[in-house]
Amino acid sequence: MKVLEMKDVGKVFYTKTQETQAVSHLSFDVNDGEFVSIIGPSGCGKTTVLSLVCKLLAPTSGQVVLNGNSRVGYMLQRDHLFEWRTIEKNVQLGLEIMHKLTPENKEYANGLLKKYGLWEFRKHYPSELSGGMRQRTALIRTLATNPDLLLLDEPFSALDFQTRLTVCDDVYDIIKKEKKTALLVTHDISEAISLSDRIIVLSARPATVVAVHEPHLSDIPSPLKRRESSDFAKQFELLHGYLHGDKS
Amino acid sequence: MKNNFTREHLLFLRRQRVRKTLIHVTQVGVLLLLLGVWELAALLGWIDSFITSSPSRIWKTLVELIADGTLWKHLWVSTWETLAGFAIGTGLGYAVAVVLWWNDFLKEVFEPYIVVLNSLPKIALGPIIIIWAGTGKASIVTMAVLISVVITTITILNGFLETDKDKELLLRSMGANRLQIFVKLVAPANVPTLLATLKINVGMAWIGSIMGEYLASKEGLGYLIVYGKQVFRLDLVMTCTVVLCALAGLMYALVSLLEKAVVKKY
Ligand SMILES: Nc1ncnc2c1ncn2[C@@H]1O[C@H](COP(=O)(O)OP(=O)(O)OP(=O)(O)O)[C@@H](O)[C@H]1O
Ligand SMILES: [Mg+2]
């Protein structure tokens, strides 16, 4: 089942001095339960694509189709936890906004906190947590509203390399356990290979699909272990080639 | 956690404490020295205490003013005016900031007006206020409001506009409307801004009310000061000034306490 269909989508930004074509003739699908990554050179329009998917922006041309009443949860680059709210209250933010703070939903959010090791910290403020825990909180905040499609915009880029690897593993684990469909934006090729079922490579601005690649590593459960797989380097070379324009 | 300090840490804390005490002692010392020199100079006739007054004369005047109830009456009037000006000025300024944040169009329309109003010396409006609001408390409160309201709007609006755009994006991706963005994000994120504004406004409201009393009034500390000047009783002028210092300091301290209690979280 398709959760998301992008049909020949184009997006143009107008400012006082210029007109920027950020996305052009972009088409791709995301299927239920899939983990799809989008990679592309910086400034090519990746964030714009996610904004289009969650309807923060309207496409200039083409169509963005979300299956039925699929709901979308957006996780941004930084955790953006509200410093004046406890972890528990941060996690409930989406529910509050959607007027869905029912006892069952609260219970679900609390369940996520318990399951992913943040229950003891529920009364703490974000400043008392480590970077990795904050990121996990941000993910749980996104999951608490029970979205059908998760959008992740470089969610690990604010972390240092070591933390990044473990948090990446952690987040992947949670997304798989909760059986979510995910669309991840990154400029890190290794991250894309180790996490995804499918990788969509975008061109430089205006973004359009250059190639679609399937890593076929899903029999290895942990993204961290996938990095040690024998054809990881080959796949890296291939994607690197796509990104830098030599398609040989 | 508290009792696991290392010896070096304890030493460090001790040094900090000693330094703090030394600062307080010196502060009091400076005051006493000043008062002492002033008193001595007056006593030995180096200065004319008829013009400069002296600590002992101020004290005597203060006791008299308290005894005959004059002080309380005027002090109460000024405090009341200042508090009213402070509350109305801050509230109104905040409300205007909310409206201008809400509506970009209005913000751009009113920007130049606010800039002009901010640079205008409000005392220039004194005569107009007196003609419109009379010479009673109303015009003095109006003065205090005028002085604090514009700066409140400017400071608070700046805070509102500087609120993290990505956090706003996050809320919008959850489907938040403008009211929710304000209540859940912009208002709480700007509690420190509001508290800073309160601190500024303590001073502003006092300037406004005393200036108002200078212009036109029958009571209040500002009135007493002007009266003292007219009948050339410098003791009265000085005493009122001292009382004013104490009052403004007290109000500032109260706001600081509030800030300490609230700001920890933000
Ligand atoms: N609101 C906007 N108004 C005008 N131009 C915009 C706007 N948002 C994005 N752009 C432009 O569109 C292009 C794509 O931006 P976008 O943020 O989607 O790129 P990105 O691939 O996410 O970049 P990065 O790798 O830096 O995260 C950029 O040239 C940017 O300047
Ligand atoms: Mg981006």
Image (cartoon, coloured by chain):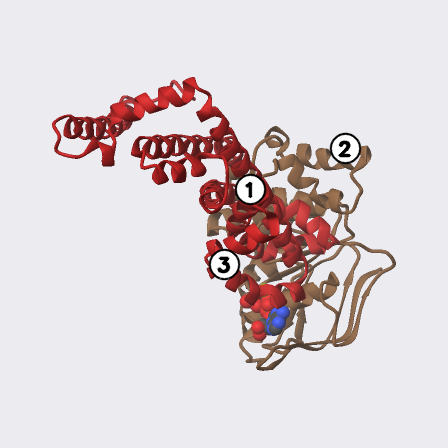
Chain colours: A brown, B red
Question: In the rendered view, would you say A40 is above or below A114?
Answer: below
Q: Nearer the viewer, residue B12 or B129?
A: B129
Q: Return the x and y of residue A233 as percentages of the image width and height.
A: 53, 63
Whether residues under marks 1 and 3 lie with C-beta atoms below 8 angstroms apart, the answer is no
Disc 2: which residue: A107
Label 2, secondary structure: give it. helix
Q: Amino acid at mark 3?
A: Asn
Question: In the rendered view, would you say B172 is above or below A234?
Answer: above
Q: Chain of mark 3?
A: B
Q: Amino acid at mark 1?
A: Gly
Q: Nearer the viewer, residue A70 or A218?
A: A70
In the image, the residue with mark 3 has its CB under 8 Å from the nearest atom of ligand 1:
no
Q: Which residue is pictured at 62% across the width and 48% down the height? A: B92
Disc 1: which residue: B85
Q: Return the x and y of residue B138 as percentages of the image width and height.
A: 59, 43
Disc 3: which residue: B118
Q: Amino acid at mark 2?
A: Glu
Q: Chain of mark 1?
A: B
Q: Quadrant of the N terminus of chain B?
A: top left
